[in-house]
Amino acid sequence: MVLLLLCTACSAATLTSYPTQVPSSSLPGQQFWKEGVSSFLFGTNDTQEWYSNNVETSAAIQQALKDAHFTLMRTFFFDKSLADGHSTTDAEIEQRLKTIENSGMTCLGVLFNIFDVNFDKHVVTYAGPRCQIYEFGNESDYNGISIDTYLKQWNEVIPLLRHINPNAKFIGPATHNNLGNNNFMMMFLQGVRSSGVLPDAISFHWYPCYQDIESSCLFKANSYGQAALVVHALVQHILGKNLPVGITEWNYFPSYPPPAYGDDPNFISNFTTDALLSMIQADVVFACQFDAASGTFGLDMFDYRTNEPKSQFITMNNLIQQYRT
């Protein structure tokens, strides 16, 4: 049955592009640019900081993002630091919010620990209107959280957060790929259909290249759109309607160290262009390159030692100028 559903979803995805048009008001701050392209395709991530010079501390990097008109910054609200385990302070929450504002971008906050309900409620309360879009958890399917546990937390916590900020939009399930381990995506959609606690948008991550040679990896740049169309089809099939679909982490490689060809300006420019064009063709509404400048996996868009932009930033900047109105 599972295989049949997934094959049906894939078949439907090849025939139909979902949705034909998502209302511009579907996510706070979203705009439509030339050719109907969603402004939120040109986002990035601010994750755990591993070097003292990073997107949160460098005014030069923030100004470069603002000048280029990047739109959506996905920022991680950790309850505890991944680096040393200390509890996150209000000053650290404030720094993340100020980084987004200084970069001229819209906030997409990741409520990283789905079990620390008090912290999640505090973040939504503290941020108020400064952050109106949230993702619940991060790769729960990959990190050993069962779908039953995730759904239990979603159904209990999301109504509490919506009560705190009725204007906020809440996104799930942030799976590590478009289907998730053990059919996590499909079961999430079935679960929220049953509970009635529907998400405002659907998210997943996509890193297509693992142990690939350069030519094979470049060939996979078009897979973003294919992966998104499968999710669109699942949403339509299970929920009976369209929801905005986004890829909240994307790049060519998922772990450290990335292959050396990622530093080739020609490769990363071609890969980035093909990836974003495939998202545009598949009606992806929001996407966040991983990452801006946090010293993570060697995928930063800026050199943390010099603050100089790398080729992926330059390519995305050029695409923004092409589509932005």
Image (spheres, grey):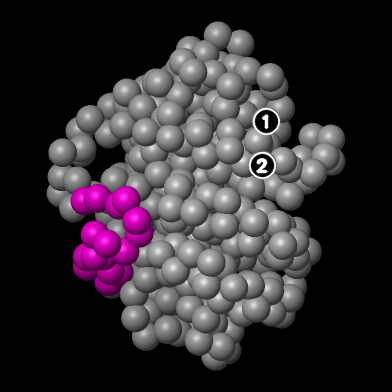
Please tell me which residue is depicted at 50% across the width and 32% down the height of the picture. Answer: 99
Q: Is residue 84 visible?
A: yes
- The span shown in magenta is 16-32
Q: CA gap, disc 1 to disc 2?
A: 16 Å
Q: Position of residue 23 (x, y in %)?
A: 24, 65
Classify residue 62 by image quadrant.
top left
Q: Is residue 185 visible?
A: no
Give yes or no for residue 153 being in the magenta stretch: no
Q: Position of residue 175 (x, y in %)?
A: 60, 61
Q: Quadrant of the C terminus?
A: top left
**Label 2 Cα neighbours within 10 Å, binned few <14 / some 14-19 / many ≥20:** few
Q: Earlier in the sequence, mark 1 or mark 2?
A: 1
The one of 235 and 7 positioned closer to us in this rendering: 235
Numbered disc 2: secondary structure: helix
Q: Quadrant of the N terminus?
A: bottom right
Discs 1/2, front: 2
Main SS of residues in magenta: loop
> Which residue is label 1 attached to?
49
Please tell me which residue is depicted at 52% across the width and 72% down the height of the picture. Answer: 163
The amino acid pointed to by label 2 is Asp
The one of 216 and 104 positioned closer to us in this rendering: 104
> Which residue is label 2 attached to?
90
Disc 1 + disc 2, Cβ < 8 Å: no
Please tell me which residue is depicted at 40% across the width and 44% down the height of the picture. Answer: 106
Residue placed furthest toward the top: 306
The amino acid pointed to by label 1 is Glu
Numbered disc 1: secondary structure: loop
Where 250 sits versus 227, above or below? Answer: above
Q: Position of residue 222 (x, y in %)?
A: 39, 48
Classify residue 86 by image quadrant.
top right
Q: Is residue 276 left or right of residue 195?
A: left
